[in-house]
Image (cartoon, rainbow, N blue to C red):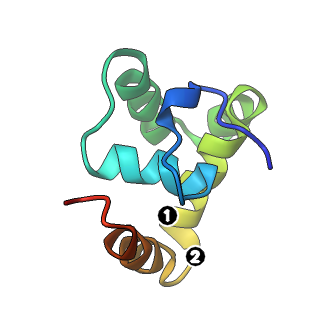
Amino acid sequence: MEKLACHESVMVEGLTPEESFIFNWQYYRFGGFLTRLVKVLLAADSDNFERLRKGFPVECRALEYFWNEKDWWSNVQKKITELGLLS
């Protein structure tokens, strides 16, 4: 399994690296560097997003799943609920 480039502490037990990244972003669990990284990824045009992918492949893939895969985020939310991560 490919690891998150940004920081291992972002990993959430029971979630994939991509799911962990989006979970932390959506529930405002990031700080400092990771908050800035998300802002840069969200603001990047397609060319720069591809450049950022070289250093942050999992994070970029996570955002692509979030943006493009039908029902991906709703399925992750169900998983989050089943794991009791918001309790």
- In the rendered image, residue 84, in percent from the top left (x then y), is placed at 31, 66
Q: Secondary structure at mark 2?
A: loop
Q: Which mark is residue 66?
A: 1
Query: Left of 26 or right of it: where is 62?
Result: right
40 w.r.t. 1: above or below: above
Q: Which mark is residue 30?
A: none
The answer to which quarter of the image holds residue 46 is top right
Query: Left of 48 or right of it: where is 27?
Result: left
Q: Are marks 2 and 1 in contact (CB under 8 Å)?
A: yes
Q: Quadrant of the C terminus?
A: bottom left
What amino acid is labelled 1 in the image? Phe
59 w.r.t. 26: above or below: above
What amino acid is labelled 2 in the image? Glu
For the point 73% across and 29% down, the residue is 51
For the point 52% across and 51% down, the residue is 13
The front one of 23 and 12 is: 12
Query: Left of 18 or right of it: where is 43?
Result: left
- In the rendered image, residue 36, in percent from the top left (x then y), is placed at 38, 22
For the point 42% across and 25% down, the residue is 34
Q: Secondary structure at mark 1?
A: helix
Residue that carries the numbered disc 2 in the rendered image: 69
Question: Rounded to the nearest whole Å, what is the CA distance between mark 2 and mark 1?
Answer: 6 Å
Query: How many badges with numbers are in the image?
Result: 2
